[in-house]
Amino acid sequence: MPSLPQFNPLRIRSYVLRLPLATRLMMAAIVGLWAATIPLPWLRAWASLDPDKIGLATMHRFNTFPLMHINFFHMIFNVIALTPLLERFESEFGTLVTLALFTGPFGLLPGGLYYLLETFVLRGNTTVMGASVWVFLLLSSEAMKTYKANPNFSIGPYKIPTWTTPLILVLVVSFLVPNVSLLGHLCGAGIGFLWGLGYIRFLVPHEKILRWIESKLNLLGRLPHYVSVDQKTYGRYGVLPTAAGLGNMPRSPEPGQRLGP
């Protein structure tokens, strides 16, 4: 009889300790804001995306609503779902790109799209908050990559396009979980599809600018768990330390060759 997988806190601790920098910061911000609402409950109304309260002085809502949550369970489920997706994104694109996108366009674009549809199309005023908008954004981005390698998956006699997986999940969550925003999740998924297709990659600062910032501030040397934007040259976590006295050892004929994933 096969044994069931056992809960191993050491493996969870090891995984958490290996998380890259931007993922750590975003998770800390989510948990910290939830904790801050205990003594300061007005923070929830200040950070949520309330269409009727959007104006020039309240544009911060587009970037704060994914960080704010209704209660502990809402927060913890989103943290569990978002962490592996965000860690994978940061490992691919680097810490600077992750921070630039998730503190800017990846909040503004789905939030702005939700505001326009909710206000001018549906004529409603439903307040939304929560990192699930980022979960579906990243799931949609991953689905487009999977679609290129495996366009379809089969359920019985039916072949279903792989890119539709996040949309199916959006519908399932809307049916099973009460008080979730179907429109908000669809807005997040829509921006994720645009990113996966490459239509909004121009939002990322040029690599030369990012390399200059990294070298000027010596981010690789100063910040632990920092992921370099220039992974082809420096690897995932920057330049590996080298020992002195290796001058006579044979070298690779291909300078700058990357080791590992």
Image (cartoon, rainbow, N blue to C red):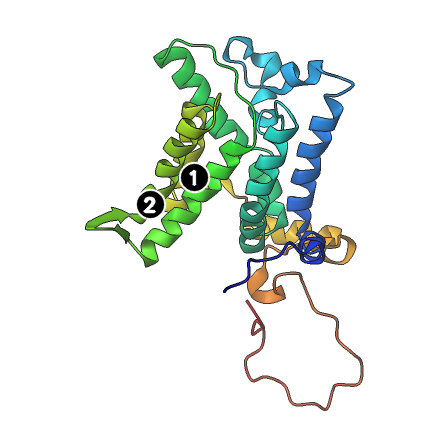
Displayed quadrant of residue 186: top left
Q: Is residue 208 above or below residue 110?
A: below
* Residue 217 x/y as whole percent: 74, 50
User: Which circle's residue, 1 or 2, is located before the other in the chain?
Assistant: 2
* Pointer 2 local density, CA inside 10 Å: few below 14, some 14–19, many at least 20: many
In the structure shown, which secondary structural element does the residue marked by tag 2 occupy?
Answer: helix
Give whichever of 198, 77 is nearer the camera: 77
The quarter of the picture where the C terminus appears is bottom right
- The residue that appears at 60% across and 15% down in the rendered structure is 58
Displayed quadrant of residue 224: bottom right
- The residue that appears at 57% across and 71% down in the rendered structure is 258
Q: Which mark is residue 163?
A: 2
* Pointer 1 local density, CA inside 10 Å: few below 14, some 14–19, many at least 20: many
Q: Tag 1: residue type?
A: Gly
Q: Is residue 110 left or right of residue 41?
A: left
In the structure shown, which secondary structural element does the residue marked by tag 1 occupy?
Answer: helix
- Residue 80 in sight from this viewpoint: yes
Q: What residue is disc 1 on?
A: 192
Q: Is residue 24 above or below residue 47?
A: below
